[in-house]
Amino acid sequence: MVIGSGPIVIGQAAEFDFSGTQACRSLREEGYKTVLVNSNPATIQTDPDTADSVYIEPLMASNIAKIIEKEGVDGVLSGMGGQTALNICSELADSGELERLHCSLVGTQPDAIAMSEDRELFKETMERIGEPVPVSRSVNTIEEAKEAVKIIGRYPVLIRPAYTLGGTGGGIAHNEEELEEICARGLAYSRIHQVLIEESVLGWKEYEYEVMRDSNDNCIIICNMENLDAMGIHTGESIVVAPCLTLSDTDHQRLRTAALKVIRALNIEGGCNVQFAFNPANGDYRLIEVNPRVSRSSALASKATGYPIARVATKIAVGYTLDEIPNRITGTTCAAFEPSIDYVVIKIPRWPFDKFRTVDRHLGTQMKSTGEVMSIGRTFEEALLKGLRSLEIGVKGLDRVDVTDEQIREELVDATDKRIFVMAEALRRGWSEEEVADLAKWDIFFVKKLSNIIDMENRIKAGLTTDILREAKEMGFSDETIAELTGSKPLEIRAERKKNGIVPVYKMVDTCAAEFEAGTPYFYSTYGRSTEYRGDDGRKKVVIVGGGPIRIGQGIEFDYCCVHGVMALQEEGVDAIIINNNPETVSTDYDISDRLYFEPLTLEDVLNVIDAEQADSVICQYGGQTSVNLAMDIEAATKGTKTRVLGTSPDEMDVAEDRRRFSKLMDELKIKQPRSGTGYSFEEAKAIAEDIGYPVLVRPSYVLGGRAMEIVYSTEELKTYVDTAVKVSRNHPILIDKYLTEAIEIDVDCVCDGKDVYIGGIMEHVEYAGCHSGDATMVLPPFTLKQETIDEIVDITERVALALQIHGLMNLQLAVKDGQVYMIEANPRASRTVPFISKATGIPLAKIGTKIMLGKTLKDFGLKGYRPIDHYAVKASVFPFLKLPGVDSILTPEMKSTGEVMGIDEDFHTACYKALIAAGNKLPTEGGVYITVNDQDKPRIVEPARQLKEMGFTIYATKGTSTYLREHGVETTSVFRLDERQNPNAIGLMRDGKINLIINTPSQKSGAVRDGYTMRRLAVELEIPFMTTVQGAEIAVGSIKVARSQKLDVRSMKDFHGLV
Amino acid sequence: MAKGYLVLEDGTVFEGELFGAECETNGEVVFTTGMCGYQESLTDPSFKGQILVMTYPLIGNYGVADEYYQSRAIHVRGLVVREYCKEPSPMYGGRTIDDFLKTFGIPGISGIDTRDLVIKIRTGGTVKGAITSDAEGIEDLVKRLRDMPAPSESNLVGEVSCKQISSRDNGKELTVGLIDCGTKSGILRDLNARFNVVTFPYDTPADVIVDSGVKGVLISNGPGDPAHPDIAKTTVRTVSDLSTQLPLFGICFGSQLIGIAMGGSTYKLKFGHRGCNQPVKNGNRVYITSQNHGFAVDEHSLDGTGLVVNQVNVNDGSVEGVVHRDLPIFTSQYHPEASPGPCDTSYLFDWFGKMIKEGRL
């Protein structure tokens, strides 16, 4: 059995889809029957053909035990599903459950897990083998923490909770006050209520080693990595370069030898990641952390070197030794060697701060980034600039930032996501490299590389010659940057380049620095003498533009779609070529596509690959907004060549994206839309809003994906919005839509071949319209809609798909209010619900969409219209609020979730229950419920309240709700509202642990949605489930009943698809 | 920055920028895949006569420091890199590789697509080449390169071996001899940590060594062809004479000499093994080793010599170590002293001591 890592959260992203998928393939190659369990439907590993049995079930030890029993599992691979899987395995082993089921852990063993995860044991083990660790003490209370600081002797100290992922709840305390605060948090998050107080090695350099060991005690290092940011910034938050660039061989060997000693001492068979702090002043080092499993770093190391760590670790787990495992890259050598690379790899984290404007952007020991990009170049500068433009944060490279000298100083010392840009800015202003390096605690080696880039900027500005152009390209400058510096246009620079033969070559990633011949279809661009891609095999070639880094709004779903696109192309005998830059994902596994290009996803970089490949076609529908945004430009730039954009034409895509063209089409089709308008000034916006009537939905026209989208209820709020959130002007108008209050929102995904339409699924949101569909809880099929409404939705979908001449996939967002169906938007591309629907129905939409783009018809698949299913699939979202202090947990039109889970069952409430717990909601089966609802919700809350009461819950309610419930026969305990400042109130009861569930529907009056922040934030921190709608409350109550009945069945996907 | 050219005997010309000493050079062009440890490689006497290509594109990042010398001088004849670091990390003092090459009069060339060059060498085998600044003279240079004898046709060992016997008392129980064919200081370091050491020039006769009272002899690494007639007359004869009198341990070139001395033969590899990541199987264990050799012992030539292969290269099956069936003799084709590279096999020096004490491996 392979256990996945569940939903994408900060600290656990797509890397475990990659590792789990590799593990399953690796096991099946050896003839093992495999069982895969994960709650995340947006993964490749939960595809029906990844394993013999696939379960989409909540990742809880009790569930896993049921599956083990049902499937007769002999062994569980513990190291492929991140901390989540590791914790479950520990729990199953500790409880004796594994023994009872005659099942064993394969790979990393419980004692090894304990030795590396339990701080005290880890320290003891390291002391035994003579490897230095920071002076530290494990503590269970705040008082003990203070004692520990006395022993260490000085602040600052680090606080690290045991058994958490991504450093959740950790921090750096500079004084006693901070110590108390961080410890309180850390103790609460730790599964065993333990934190480590540790000597600070802040400012030391940080290095990482990826190690493998087999049962014969053969040990190798796959890759080492150097963090540009010094200790104090989590490695997941740091810019990282591989291999280490500033270590001498002697010091590298010291750390390498230490890493091997560690993996031997921990008796790990498989992969492991060892982190070191290294004092540049005297060469001292400390062992900081060991992860006894594959990790995000090992995914990075796999992509950086071409060495398939998860695959090899799996083979080791089932008993092979390294010399028995072939190196598939060279085909002639084996896995027992250390990769040598001949390029520079850079990883840059991708942070969600564009979505959370209120969050504290400072970087520290707690992860805040949601994803990362990787780039490869033959120089540091080239890799860095490619990495920066891969981030999709609106920069072309080392772009300028608007800061004061004072801000520069602050930023250098106390980093945020912007630091590298600020460093460059400081250098441009003439700050010395020494000062910048010193303040930022960077090795000046890297600062000087930034200087090189700035020197080149100046040379370009002074006059662009062919030689300078060539040098700039070798240094990784984008055409866009060069165009900006010279006042020309990117495509002009491109033409100039091509005229002079300055085009990229493609080098191979081969694990061996070209020492052996390799056939790896894994390339990166650089500017050099020769290219290694050998051109035509005579087959048709299709490029799939990938999705880039995982961020809020664009998650693993799009990688799933890209991979399915690849599979479908290959099934049709077409060469599938992937361009992507996300090292965590399955799509960037060199084994997946016919050729993989690890490149930024800008027009320039994508066109370069198209040119080099002489590609026949390009698919832009699958990489989310990243690829859709390129469609028009790719089509324009390839005009006159043989390359075509496949599927829905970019012009039709534009109809859907362009509000005016789309509104016109809807009018023609007589499909209702909420009234809307575009305001070019506050006055215009105000007039439109008043005409339409509040509340209205407002957003800037120039940002996509729900960013800065808000519901405003009054002119004052509109004023605040334009004053603080967005600037409105002639060039930057704001869009204003009527907000349909209490409307039911619907998502539809369909496939269309231009003649017929197949409706993959209709999903009803639990939350009212206005909550971003990426955040909403969704139920497939609809659970409250009348048949006639469903019929109308089907009809609208068909008409819109045909009118837009969709060839491939389309997603519609609709709202239903008072029986009327309104169009909200149409997305002519794969949506994030495609994998969810595919898993729920067993129909692989993305594959079918791809084949349709290649010219097949829906008839070929026997698909048409809408087919209901006879079970329920519920999608629930997971949110990063716990990791992002200062963020409000209220759901709004702006997407906030990082990932999703699916609950699937024949019974609606059971499906809901599975989804809710899989998403990490700690649904109580007893205790207290706090209910406070607005007036119009009062009648509907009576029944849920009554049921809770019957189950023995104590109902706490504020006066209004309390009175109403009592009048309707539900006994309650009245509490004060927070603004009454009297006890008992909700906050006090929450802190006392008396409230285990909160039902709070905000009133629709002005500003009300922003109230209750304190309570919501506390609920987040105490992990109390929080329902903000009546439907949500009803679902929670239904789910609690399921939980109390304890009759939870586990069923494989095959069982469900048998029902379709 | 002066323009320069790397010219190969097949007529291929790479344009780049010159650094280091301003002079022309030629030699056998070889590559190493070690990602760091450039200073150790440059000063490794085994590279005598060769122009070294570093496959890692960024060279000189951490500078050059006194403690990383493997001998007193740079032995490569030229250095080829994608990019050399002009402003290294200050962690180890910050001396540049440019300055380092200048000090020893060795030229370097940067801006070369080293991956392209390596693929050429991998495909066509080791080639002769030159670094020059003279664009006009290239055609002529190619002709000269073709006519030029391979560097290994001269006695390179004679150029790098010590000239006098020296000894060092480390206060250890055992005293061992080291036949210096161009030894790296890493070998001395590992010997000094365990033994008192007497170092002999490569052409020292066996009786001198036996008379010195050493209890075992290590034959070091070194440059060139182990089958060179000057070596056959000197070191090989010495080793042959010693084989029945003292325990022997051969490293790299020394391993090949033991093979020849016992009656076996060597051959030239297509492009050699140079790097820090070569897997070697010893029993059922695999060790990652540091390597730098262009020649290897021919396994088939060992029949009847008493030597048996006990270690092989996992990648290509070539001989990585032999052991004598009856006599206390063993070898490693790779470098247990690392420098640069992994220290995983430094236990071989302990084996050496154990073998001396127990009379067998």
Image: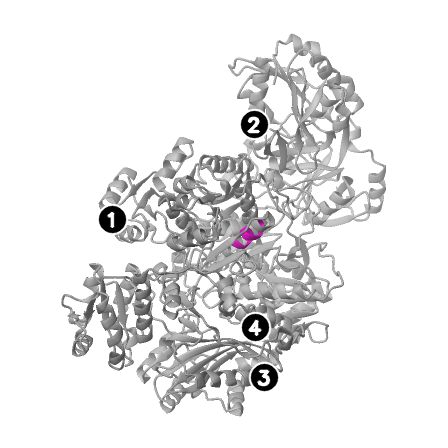
Residue B184, horizontal then vertical, whole percent = 62, 27
Q: Is residue B153 visible?
A: yes
Nearer to us: label 2 or label 3: 3
Q: Which residue is mark 1?
A: A176
Above/below status of B186 relative to B96:
above
Look at the image and say whether residue A154 sits in the magenta stretch.
Answer: no
Quote the CA–CA distance across marks 4 and 1: 51 Å
Q: Residues within 10 Å of mark 4 (few under 14, many from 20)?
A: many
Amino acid at dot 2: Ser
Is tag 4's residue or tag 1's residue first in the polypeptide sequence?
1
- The segment highlighted magenta reads A20-26
> Which circle marks residue A802 in the picture?
3
Does the CB distance between marks 3 and 4 fall below 8 Å? no
Q: Chain of mark 4?
A: A
Amino acid at dot 4: Val
Above/below status of A115 relative to A898:
above
What is the number of callouts on the image? 4
Q: Nearest the camera: A414 or B357?
A: B357
Is tag 3's residue or tag 4's residue first in the polypeptide sequence?
4
Q: Which residue is mark 2?
A: B346
Residue drawn at point x = 51 percent, y = 62 percent: A1054
Residue A492, horizontal then vertical, whole percent = 66, 71
Q: Residues within 10 Å of mark 1 (few under 14, many from 20)?
A: some
Badge 1 element: helix
